[in-house]
Image (spheres, rainbow, N blue to C red):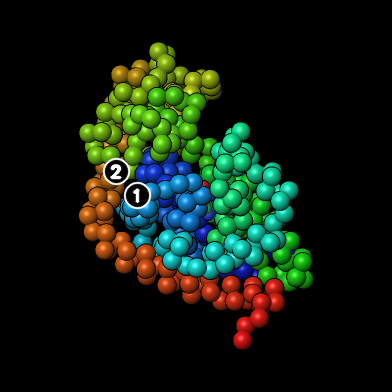
Amino acid sequence: MTNTNFTPRVFSGVKPSGGLTLGNYLGAIKRFVGMQGQMETVYCVVDMHAITVWQDPKELSNMTREVAAGYLAAGLDPTRSILFNQSQVSAHAELGWIFNCVARVGWMNRMTQFKDKAGSNAEKQSLGLYAYPALMAADILLYHATHVPVGDDQKQHVELTRDIAAKFNHDFGRDFFPLTEPVIEGPAMRIMNLRDGTKKMSKSGESDMERINMTDDADKIAKKFKKAKTDPEPLPETVDGLKDRPEARNLVDIYAALNDVTPEAVIAEYPGAGWGKFKPALADLAVEKLAPMSAEMSRFMDDPAEIDRILADGAAKARAIADPILRDTYDIVGMLRS
Ligand code: TRP
């Protein structure tokens, strides 16, 4: 089975639970936007995934708009990409159900993200959190997406998506769903916490100083980088010297990603530099790259009606692709249409 019969199409999603951080921007949104024009691009704010854990209703609507504003501020062009929120295209839920009936319980039990999130409290989690990878497979396969840019933590879910597609194709004797390729981020894309370089930069950590929010203004961005935790050593002469120095590694990675260069190039530019030199340079670069985006984001957030209009328009375009694929799926499964 090959994917050559399928139009190259990118699909990816960001969950609107909590605000967007620099990690979301460098690890996901920036790359998504960079794929515009290379092939058809479909980007989704996955609000139905967000409610697998409790979300305050007002906050959920706000965050859905904020994620959309983040995409737009980062350069997503709604005339070149489809941008919408998942719940406005009901075919996601419908195909999700079909896939609940294709995926096996044993497959779900192997998903490491559920185990990590649920911990010893699995019995108290929502059934949705457990079943969520089948909905993610539906998000992807509803568009016959051939490529899915995701972080490393989502690779297993894209593999599951391939398993679901293969089983569906096999069970019904049809080459109907593509076997989607994960497009995994480069090495510099795992952005870590500014106060603890061994932890991922998260939207929900207790201190705001540990992360850069996409909505932070120039003063905040500069202050957070200047106060970022480091070890006492200066930068090394080669990247090998960053080994076992998580905070130093992270700041070099961030500099590299913001400037679209390799960590090697950053070290070559600042060999042996002290933090008194490197941190202000990083702060300046971050302000230059991020502050205009955060200003653009607030401009969008001040005009929610405009965001809603863009999402509604995107949802209509998404339905035009998704609805015929769902209809064909129902026909293949034998759902009677009278
Ligand atoms: N599971 C992804 C995350 O937690 C979000 C997501 C939902 C997604 N559906 C998707 C990503 C489809 C890529 C494709 O980050």
Q: Secondary structure at mark 2?
A: loop
Q: Residues within 10 Å of mark 1 (few under 14, many from 20)?
A: few
Residue 74 shows in the view: no
Q: Secondary structure at mark 1?
A: helix
Nearer to the camera, 25 or 140: 140
Depicted 256 relative to depicted 322: above or below: above
Spot occupied by residue 337 in the image (x, y as percentages of width and height):
62, 83
Of marks 2 and 1, which one's residue comes earlier in the chain? 1
Left or right position of 104 against 265: right
Q: Quadrant of the N terminus?
A: bottom right
How far from the left and from the top, in percent, is residue 175? 71, 70
Residue at the extreme bottom of the image, as rendered: 338
Residue 11 position in % (x across, y down): 52, 59
Q: Residue at x 53, y 37 (%)?
A: 187
Give the number of the mark in front: 2 or 1: 1
User: Would you say residue 12 is visible in this rendering?
Assistant: yes
Q: Which residue is disc 2 drawn over? A: 215
Kind of residue at badge 2:
Thr
Find disc 1 in the rendering and name its residue.
Answer: 59
Which residue is depicted at the point 51% across and 72% down?
A: 321
Crowd band around label 2 with a 10 angstrom C-alpha radius: few (<14), some (14–19), many (20+): many
Check the image and report above or below for 189 versus 311: above
- Give the percent coordinates (x, y) of residue 245: 49, 20
How far apart marks 2 and 1 lie (CA) works out to 16 Å
- The residue positioned 37% from the left and 33% from the top of the image is 211
